Amino acid sequence: MKMNKLSCIALTLFAGISIAPVSMANDQAGSGPNPFTDCGIGAALFPDTHWAAVTSNVIWDVGTTALTSATASPETCSGAKVEAAHAAITESVRAEMGVKVSADGYSSMDQLQKSADFYGVINTVVEQAHSDSCAA
């Protein structure tokens, strides 16, 4: 019980410290990207559905990737990879993940391996879409 309180306090402090530089980096307070809706995997998958982006970011890794993106490189939150999450890309990710999930051995993989597969699929699909749009 004591460890849960310490973990909760540490997480709250980390989140507060991580978000502070984002607002300080811009001329106007609050003018930077919202880490949970504009950054991370959640923003890539759900660019127009904020509650889903937040939920995805929190479930994925407690929002640390989104917070890191917003803090260290806020320009990536509105870059090509975030903007690339349109219907065709979403369908491609779903199709690729369908193949992965139905493969033998997927259910015995640990969460880290499944997460790495999911990230790899998203990255590959977005990179392919970006390459295709640049080639046109």
Image (tube, rainbow, N blue to C red):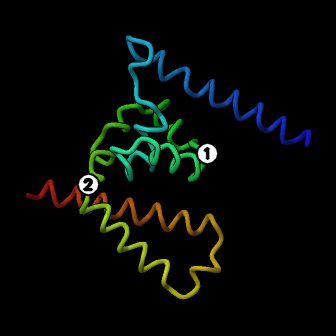
Count every numbered label the image shows and give the total.
Answer: 2
Q: Find residue 20 and report its horizontal and vertical position in percent.
A: 55, 20
User: Do the residues under discs 2 and 1 have CB atoms within 8 angstroms?
Assistant: no
Report which residue position mark 2 lands on.
86
Q: Position of residue 113 (x, y in %)?
A: 59, 68
Percent of width and height locating residue 101: 49, 78
The 10 Å Cα crowd at callout 2, few under 14, some 14 to 19, many 20 or more, is some
The residue positioned 48% from the left and 34% from the top of the image is 35
- Residue displayed at 56% across by 68% down: 114
Q: Is residue 100 above or below residue 1?
A: below
Q: CA distance from mark 2 to mark 1?
A: 24 Å
Quadrant (top left/top right/bottom left/bottom right) for the N terminus:
top right
Q: Residue, x 67% and y 30% (percent of image)? A: 14
- Along the horizontal axis of the image, is 49 left or right of 18? left
28 displayed left or right of 134: right
What SS does tag 2 mark? Answer: loop
Residue type at mark 1 is Val
**Front one among 5 and 24:** 5
Image quadrant where residue 126 sits = bottom left
- Give whichever of 130, 1 is nearer the camera: 1
Badge 1 crowding class, 10 Å Cα cut-off, few under 14, some 14 to 19, many 20 or more, is: some
User: Residue reaching furthest bottom?
Assistant: 104
Specify the amino acid type for callout 2. His
What residue is shown at x 58% (from left), y 85% (from top)? 105
- The numbered disc on residue 62 is 1
What kind of element bears circle 1? loop
User: Quadrant of residue 18 in the image?
Assistant: top right
Camera-nearest residue between 61 and 124: 61
Figure check: 136 above or below 74: below
In terms of depth relative to the viewer, which is nearer, 62 or 126? 62
